[in-house]
Image (cartoon, helix red, strand yellow):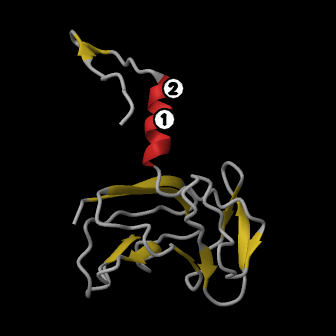
Amino acid sequence: MPNATLIRPTHHKASVAYNSAHLQTLILESLVAYWRMEEVSWDGTANELIDISGSGNHGAMQGVGSVNSSTGKLGQGFNANGVNYFHCPVGVVSQTAMTIAMWIKSNSSLAANKGRFFATEDSGGSLKEMRTGNDGVDTPLSLFVINEDNTDNVAVVLPAT
């Protein structure tokens, strides 16, 4: 692991000191995948969603028909309609601890329809997903509400299994 400067509080005020080159190296070496979602459109073709982390974990959009891009806060995104979804390549979610994070924006409240915006199975068949409601069958780790027309950063930390 590359060296990283420890971030410590000084007296009663917090100060942050870090070596940005080492921190950037640490982040890049730790990435399993990074999908920018900058493609103009998707049709489910294998490896159409490019992983720019260098790990080669390209994905594909799945669902009925093609998936349209949508203007995001920075660049593009995809417009999920409740049928289409991003298919995470096998092996990306592993036995090691990891964080999955993304920016999402809803055009309606997702609390009522239990919106799922990421799901994948590991090799043991264990489903890991991020969604905003409880279907009464699965036990969610936590629930939250995504309010209409807000852009929210959401993340889940998965422990090692």
Q: What's the residue type where badge 1 is placed?
A: Thr
In the image, is 161 to the left or to the right of 74? left
Residue farthest to the bottom? Answer: 64
Where on the picture, by quarter, is residue 79? bottom right
Residue farthest to the top? Answer: 11
In the image, is 11 to the left or to the right of 154? left
Name which residue lies at 65% across and 68% down.
49
Residue occupied by mark 2:
21
Check if mark 2's residue and mark 1's residue have beta carbons within 8 Å.
yes
Up-down relation of residue 18 to residue 73 (above or below) = above
Q: Nearer the viewer, residue 108 or 132?
A: 132
In the image, is 110 to the left or to the right of 86? left
In the image, is 51 to the left or to the right of 18? right
Question: Percent from the top left, x then y, of residue 159?
Answer: 24, 59
Residue farthest to the right? Answer: 40
Where on the picture, by quarter, is residue 133? bottom left
Compute the Cα span from label 2 to label 1: 6 Å
Mark 2 falls on what kind of element?
helix
Name which residue lies at 59% across and 71% down.
59
Question: Percent from the top left, x then y, of residue 25?
Answer: 48, 35
Q: Which mark is residue 72?
A: none
Question: Percent from the top left, x then y, of residue 58?
Answer: 60, 67
Residue occupied by mark 1:
25
Question: Percent from the top left, x then y, of residue 48?
Answer: 69, 72
